[in-house]
Amino acid sequence: MSKTMLPGRSGLDITRMLKADDDLKNIPVLAVTSFAMEGDRERILESGCDGYIPKPITINGFLETVARHLSTPGLRAPRGVS
């Protein structure tokens, strides 16, 4: 990716660093991104991210994805929020 939203490093670079560290590698990393072109999802997951959430997001979809990666059944958006 040529564009970076973090100063000096991309989120994928940081993900690779986290996943290379034995003490941190099991922390789930979810990419929430506006990069939704063909191949972006695969590249993001190959970098070590555990999940991919393209923008725009919905609260329910976001919470379901987070719950799935944290193994927290029953985590739901407040009623009426989507």
Image (tube, helix red, strand yellow):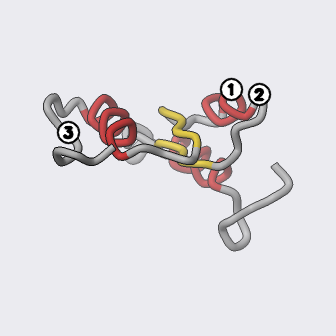
Q: Which residue corresponds to the image point at 16% horizontal and 28% vertical from the top-left?
A: 73
Q: Nearer the viewer, residue 15 or 33?
A: 33
Marks 3/1 in contact by CB < 8 Å: the verdict is no
Query: Which one is closest to the eye, mark 3 or mark 1?
Result: 3
| Residue with the mark numbered 1 | 42
> Are there few (<14), some (14-19), or many (20+) residues within 10 Å of tag 3?
some
Q: Nearer the viewer, residue 41 or 23?
A: 41
Mark pair 3, 1: CA separation: 27 Å
Q: What element carries label 3?
A: loop
Q: Is mark 1 on a helix, strand or loop?
A: helix
Q: Is residue 70 left or right of residue 47?
A: left
The image shows a total of numbered marks equal to 3
In this view, which residue lies farthest toward the bottom? 7
Q: Which residue corresponds to the image point at 57% horizontal and 35% vertical from the top-left?
A: 48
| Residue with the mark numbered 3 | 76
Along the polypeptide, which appears first: circle 3 or circle 2? 2
Does 44 appear above or below 10?
Answer: above
**Image spot of residue 59 (x, y percent):** 35, 46
Mark pair 3, 2: CA separation: 30 Å
Dividing the picture into quadrants, the one containing residue 79 is: top left
Mark pair 1, 2: CA separation: 5 Å
**Which amino acid type corresponds to the residue marked 1 in the rendered image?**
Glu
Q: Which residue corresponds to the image point at 42% horizontal and 44% vertical from the top-left?
A: 58
Q: Nearer the viewer, residue 6 or 16?
A: 6
Marks 1/2 in contact by CB < 8 Å: the verdict is yes
**Which amino acid type corresponds to the residue marked 3 in the rendered image?**
Arg
> Are there few (<14), some (14-19), or many (20+) residues within 10 Å of tag 1?
few
| Residue with the mark numbered 2 | 39
Q: Can you tell which mark lies on residue 33?
A: none
**Image spot of residue 14 (x, y percent):** 60, 54
Does 2 appear above or below 68?
Answer: below
